[in-house]
Amino acid sequence: MESRIGVIGIIVENRREAAPRVNEILSRHADIIVSRMGVPYREKNLSVIALIVDGTTDALGALTGQLGALPGVKVKSALARRLSGADP
């Protein structure tokens, strides 16, 4: 199956309750996460997480589906076909 590269944006609206479950899911899918940046926004009691990912559509769908099923967690993704390494 073809690998895809993309960005996943995650907003965790209730950090104290949802963060442990979000981190558990991200740990289970660590093999497709290339990079992760998390920014806590304490004044609003939320966090914003940006992931760079590289995986099959099935693996990426599993990750976003599990995250999106959590109460208070919003997930959006943008995916592109993986380039073969050749210059455009």
Image (tube, rainbow, N blue to C red):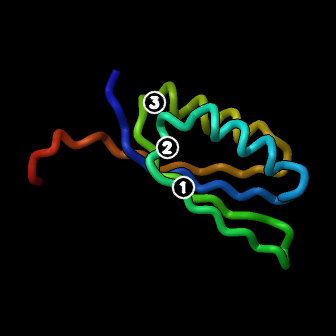
Instruction: Name which residue type carries label 3.
Output: Thr
Within-10-Å neighbours for mark 3: few <14, some 14–19, many 20+? some
Find numbered disc 2 in the image and state the secondary structure of the residue it sits on: strand
Disc 1 marks a residue whose amino acid type is Arg
Find the residue positioned furthest to the top: 1
Rounded to the nearest whole Å, what is the CA distance between mark 3 and mark 1? 19 Å
Residue matched to label 1: 36
Confirm or deny contact between disc 2 and disc 3 (CB under 8 A): no
Going from N to C along the chain, the mark reached first, 3 or 1, is 1
Whole-number angstrom distance, CA of label 1 to CA of label 2: 7 Å
| Residue of label 3 | 57
Q: Amino acid at mark 2?
A: Ile
Residue 69, image x, y percentages: 77, 36
In this rendering, would 58 be left or right of 4?
Answer: right
Q: Residue at x 63, y 59 (%)?
A: 49
Along the polypeptide, which appears first: circle 2 or circle 3?
2
The picture places residue 2, in percent across and down from the top left corner, at 32, 27
- Image quarter in which the C terminus is found: bottom left
Residue assigned mark 2: 33
Tell me if label 1 and label 2 are in contact, CB under 8 Å.
yes
The x and y percentages for residue 9 are 59, 56
Number of residue marks: 3
Residue 66, by quadrant, is top right
Q: Secondary structure at mark 1?
A: strand
In whole angstroms, how far apart are the C-alphas of marks 2 and 3?
13 Å
Which quadrant of the view contains residue 56? top left
- Picture disc at residue 12: none
Residue 50 at x, y = what percent? 56, 58
Question: The N terminus lies in which quarter of the figure?
Answer: top left
Mark 2 crowd level (few <14, some 14–19, many ≥20, 10 Å Cα): some
Who's the residue at 37% across and 38% down the image? 4
